[in-house]
Image (cartoon, helix red, strand yellow):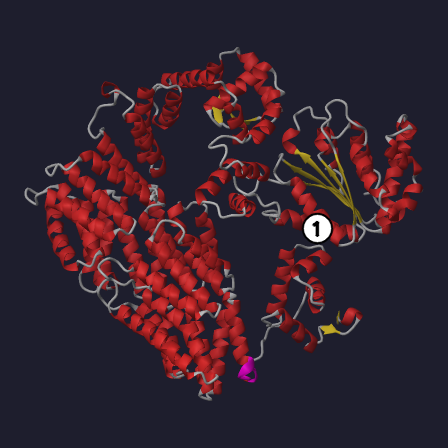
Amino acid sequence: MPQISRSAPLIGRDDELVRLTGVLERARDGVARAVLVAGDAGVGKTRVLDEVAGVASRAGMTVLAGHCVDLGDVGLPYLPFTEALGVLAADGRFAQVLAAHPVVERLLGGGTDATRDVGGRLRLFEGMAGLLADIADIAPLLLVLEDLHWADQSSRDLLRFLLSRGILQRPAGGAPTHPLAVFASYRADDLHRRHPLRPLLAELVRLPSVERLELRPMADPEVARLVRALGGAPLPDTTVRRIVERAEGNAFYAEELLAATDTEAGGVPSGLADVLLIRFEQLSDTAQQVLRTAAVAGRRVEHDLLRDAVGIPEDELESALREAVGRQLLVPGDGDTYAFRHALAREAVYADLLPGERARLHGAFARLLDGRGHRAEGAAERAHHYRESHDLAEALAASLEAADHAHRVGAPAEELRHLEAALDLWSAVESAARPAGEGVDQVTLTLRASAAAAHAGEAHRAVSLARAALAGVGQDADSELAARVRYTLAGNLLGVDNLMAAFSYSSEALAMIPAEPASRTWVWAAATHVLTARQVGENATALKVARQALRVAEQLEVPDARADLLVSLATLEGGGRRTTEGRKRLQEAREIARGAGNALVELRALFNLAIGCYESGRLDECLPWLTEGLDRARRAGLLSSLYPLEMRYLRLLVLYTLGRWDECLHAARADADVLPVAGGYTAAPAWYAQLARGDLTAADRAAALLEKPFDWMATLVAGVVLTDAAAQRGEPEAAVARVRSTVAALTDEAGLVPDITVRLAALALAPVADRAVERRLVGDEAEAGRWARTATELRDLARATAAHGESGVPQGPEGQAWLARAEAEWVRAVSGPDAEAWGRTVAAFDFGDVYERARCRLRFAEALLAADRRKEAAAEARAARETAAGLAATPLLEQIDALIRRGRLADTAPSDPRPTVLTAREQEVLRLLALGRSNRQIGEELFITGKTASVHVSNILAKLSATSRTEAVAIAYRQGLITTGQNGSGVG
């Protein structure tokens, strides 16, 4: 069982905290207000109120809290107020105030004469209002009342008086109200139609000083963060996703599901089930029967279907449904349907069924659905009910029908699920009872499941299924099916970067089928062999087979195979996909594939068009191809397959390279919600941006990719992030080690070194050169020489890779730019900064990589300054600073400013034309900055969140052109924005 951390931060409630702390801030200024905090059980009301109470307490406010308790029909009068008064009585500061209101003090004795008649109640209410006002005048007051849905009548009456006539209303003459706030919470899901709190809430929210705040379920990414924070030790992605899916935004449910991760496989934890069933057990017997039947139907059920399954008269059904809806267990939906308010409630009711009862009801639903006709969209539902009722033959037939429907509508993940269900049932159903027809055999179905897995982004599952199909087909060398299995397996092995095995299986597939007479199976076997041969460096074989197969595809009129072979030839012949001729061939392939309706081949053509533009430095031309490709994948239901995943990564990479970092980060967040587990690497360009902005946690996310089964792209992007992170930390040893391990992992069996090696070498050369320069300055020539030799090793590796890339031709503009940087860093390591080398590097990155160009401009400015070319150095530093500031690349900005100060280049820089105009709030924040306050402390003193304080600090730094809090304060003193005064400083 996971060890749950109870100190997890409050997650996902920033907006609510801003709103509540704003109410506190106004209360301190004498504007009394109340907030009614609504939300379902477990959504986090208490956690939010605890957080706000802590803020109030640290700011010097008096905090009183009272809780209502579920005591059924025998409630204790004024219980939450009595609890609050007990806290007050224990604090000696308020003894005199309590003594001044003896009618209220009697509540501490359980309530006496003052509560027994109308006059006594009024005196009590007025006394309570007076007491709270007096306390607030001593120190601002926050009164927290929790669980109003359990409040007794007396407490509700007192609350009505306080908010409508007492503490929130202005005294005569329009004087300010008292400095206090009331926060009261209640469970929205407990308020059935006749709940006594309902009319009070309706009355209170109409008051001008009362507002309502609804805590809605948390967003899925926030629940995931909460689960990981609570879990302590790292959790598998699949575990987190399953908890997020089942919790449906409820923090308590998520915590309970996490605690039971290892103990309640697939079910509802017993403690949580008990909580969920309490409301169910309060229903009448008939309503319980209806809910049990509805639970078997699933999360949602049609009225007519439920009526026929439960078998009771219509009026009894409607009465039972009204009861369940009133208790907020069911909610009515569109199309005359009903749904469980929360999926876990449905799971708890379902788990409470007896085994025989469950099978009987599943059988009833299966037969009812069958009676409606075999609608394709209902096949999955029928398959489920037949399987749970133990009618396996019907379940098999319905599973295959559901798989066919999923395939037609472009839902590969669902197709895979239904095919795997059918394969599980296959051996349990007698052969005579199995569906008959072409392609309905175990090997073909397994092969089809493998394809669905590949399309759904489950590459390793695709390989496993293809291997299972191979085991089933045997070694029949004359079988076209055997060849299909082998080339399918070869294609899947490419997806998991097992290149030599892929080449071996595609070779076997091609050898199994004679080229004459020509056949479609041979053409596709050949097309796959072209792919695998190219991946292992057998370019001559790939070119020969591709040309031969293209002639056969044209002869047999197999347009999608022809298109696939045209894509391969575009990458193999001439200058490849970077050339005009290559692009024309790729566009022709795209049109042919589109006409043939083969989305996978069309996507391959579009990806190669996009990557060809990127490799040739035409970044703006790259984005339209990616947009078209991802739109095509979306329409085909293939967003999780190989090429769309590559397109997602490339889209983010282009946005990052062009300096459109906010777009890149936004797109990465949007992708994260829909990506398969295998697609984690696609977010890497967003990590590049976060790292450049000083967020070293990006390195942790990259390192997590290496803990999963080997993935070529994941290893590549992790290598980039971790090498650059080591460079930022000034750790040349770690950077060099990461380059070596990454290149070794990515180099294939044929010895082909990946193109990314040039970038990795250049990144590692930066800290290596820094260390060599540092050792040379202190006279340690031996160490300087050792690091210079390491620099030479990295430079040579970059040279060799750039000259002969993966495709056998020199790399394009990006690769050449990284090579130029590696050469310049090498010179710096061996002999010192070289302005000409860095000038060439800056020019090389002019193809569009704005951040790397700025980094190189910093080095160029250093080299120019060393050569006493101060004016040019200042111009380069200004240009680099403008880019770094625009990107919010704080570490680079700090390095540039350090160079400007060290080199006294500021006097040559133009003054900032922007006026220094701080808002009143920013002036308050600046005053606290001068006192050395942290963001959290600023937030507490000004009654804003730490996040909001951070935004104000960032605005101040930007307006003052400062790179640090200390520099901002210094500038403010120079400009007269801060003057000496109270506590050592003040705002002028």
Q: Amino acid at mark 1?
A: Thr
Residue 924 covered by magenta stretch: no
Q: Position of residue 895 (x, y in %)?
A: 51, 74
Q: Position of residue 968 (x, y in %)?
A: 64, 71
Q: Residue at x 58, y 76 (%)?
A: 912
Q: Nearer the viewer, residue 195 or 223?
A: 223
Q: Secondary structure at mark 1?
A: helix
Task: Name the quadrant containing residue 456.
Answer: top left
Q: Start and end of the magenta stretch?
A: 901-907
Q: Relative to 903, does residue 302 appear above or below in the rendering?
A: above
Q: Please give the count of numbered marks on the rendered protein.
A: 1
The answer to whether residue 99 is left or right of residue 774 is: right
Q: Relative to 941, does residue 416 appear above or below in the rendering?
A: above
Which residue carries the number 1 mark? Answer: 21
Q: Position of residue 464 (x, y in %)?
A: 29, 40
Q: Is residue 858 visible?
A: yes
